[in-house]
Amino acid sequence: DVKVTQSSRYLVKRTGEKVFLECVQDMDHENMFWYRQDPGLGLRLIYFSYDVKMKEKGDIPEGYSVSREKKERFSLILESASTNQTSMYLCASRNGLTYNEQFFGPGTRLTVL
Amino acid sequence: GDSVTQMEGPVTLSEEAFLTINCTYTATGYPSLFWYVQYPGEGLQLLLKATKADDKGSNKGFEATYRKETTSFHLEKGSVQVSDSAVYFCALISSNTGNQFYFGTGTSLTVIP
């Protein structure tokens, strides 16, 4: 069974902390994505990666960075967490060669106090 | 640019009622179209897809037909169940969007017994 896993389901951090959200996929997918999901706004793309060590900004990259050192792992970093980054964070991956589906992880609900 | 517009929610239906969630798209290329479902507390999972005009995607009693003439991909189910309560997202990907999916804002469905 294909799987995208995220390191935490729930996370509580304080303003100013550095936060790491980890995502791992076992499908050997080239492409990986980080979204945030907020009520009324749907899914917004933060960053994506086409391959190892490659990254591209999405629609809302400010305040975030990413790292992809291995094909199966894509990390989202909040350099200095702020309360407006309280959200649900979803990781996804897909085969880059086709226009087929993305597979999503279960999400991490991050609260920044 | 390419985009997806879907029906605002929330939608509340009685069990066994007929469901329609409207989705229209804007795309200059030839997109593939998807419906994703998000059950409470979970990530998104693919419900159905269609990759070319007049294709019908179907799964779990849900159906959607890719209509190029009306640029629509409306989701329907003849008889909803309480277990269908979830948030539904329409999405597209095309040669214009590269490797990026574009999602609608989601429609929340609650089915009451």
Image: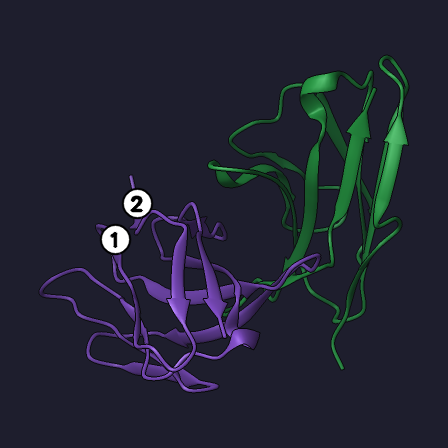
Which residue is at the front of the view, B51 or B105? B105
Where disc 2 sits, the SS reads: loop
Q: In the figure, the green chain has which letter?
A: A
Which color scheme does this rendered protein use?
by chain
Q: Which residue is tagged 2?
A: B2
Residue B82 higher or lower than B72, as above or below: below
Q: Amino acid at mark 2?
A: Asp
Q: Which of pointers 1 and 2 lies earlier in the amino acid sequence?
A: 2
- What subunit carries mark 2? B
Q: Residue at x 87, y 38 (%)?
A: A11
Of badges 1 and 2, nearer the viewer stands 1
Residue A58, placed above or below residue A50:
above
Q: Colour of chain B?
A: purple
Provide the residue designation for mark 1: B25
Seen from this angle, which residue lies furthest front? Answer: B113
Q: Quadrant of the N terminus of chain B?
A: top left
Q: Is residue B87 left or right of residue B17?
A: right
Rendered location of residue A56, percent (x, y): 60, 36
